[in-house]
Amino acid sequence: VQLQASGGGLVQPGGSLKLSCAASGSIFSIKFMGWYRQAPGKQRELVAAITSDGITNYADSVKGRFTLSRDNAKNALYLQMNSLKPDDTAIYYCNAHLWRRGVDTLEDYWGQGTQVTVSS
């Protein structure tokens, strides 16, 4: 199983970016997908997450600015980020909790990370 993240880049304060994450491989079912971020010198933190039932959870710092969506048919996750601030600068990581085909254990996978830089 691989998680491929894309969409990061450099944007001015107040701008927008959309991150994408595609899960591929021998996937039976995905229970949870989410985006985390890690800024220099800080711990990795949850940005937003969505369950297979469509229940979303956002960090307080991004509520009202970021929108998470999921395409279950494509095993894809998207994060629309609006009104970006310099404090949003970080490496963003895609995460999934899933079952592989023929495996009973729920497994945890991470994407490679994509850099988001908000600066004028």
Image (cartoon, helix red, strand yellow):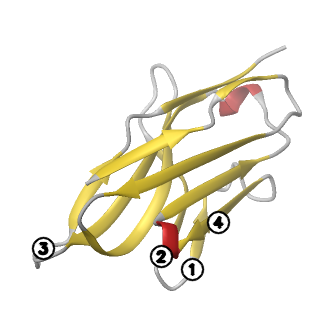
Q: Secondary structure at mark 1?
A: loop
Q: CA distance from mark 2 to mark 3?
A: 17 Å
Coordinates of residue 52 in the picture (x, y in percent): 46, 80
Residue positioned 64% across, 66% down in the render: 69
The label shown at residue 17 is: none
Q: CA distance from mark 4 to mark 1?
A: 10 Å
Residue type at mark 3? Answer: Thr
Q: Are marks 1 and 3 in contact (CB under 8 Å)?
A: no
Q: Are marks 3 and 4 in contact (CB under 8 Å)?
A: no
Residue neighbourhood size for the residue with mark 1, other residues' Cα within 10 Å, grouped as few (<14), some (14–19), many (≥20): few
Mark 4 vs mark 1: in front: 4
Q: What is the residue that sits farthest to the bottom in this orientation?
A: 53
Residue neighbourhood size for the residue with mark 2, other residues' Cα within 10 Å, grouped as few (<14), some (14–19), many (≥20): some
Q: Quadrant of residue 118?
A: top right
Residue neighbourhood size for the residue with mark 4, other residues' Cα within 10 Å, grouped as few (<14), some (14–19), many (≥20): some
User: Which circle's residue, 2 or 3, is located before the other in the chain?
Assistant: 2
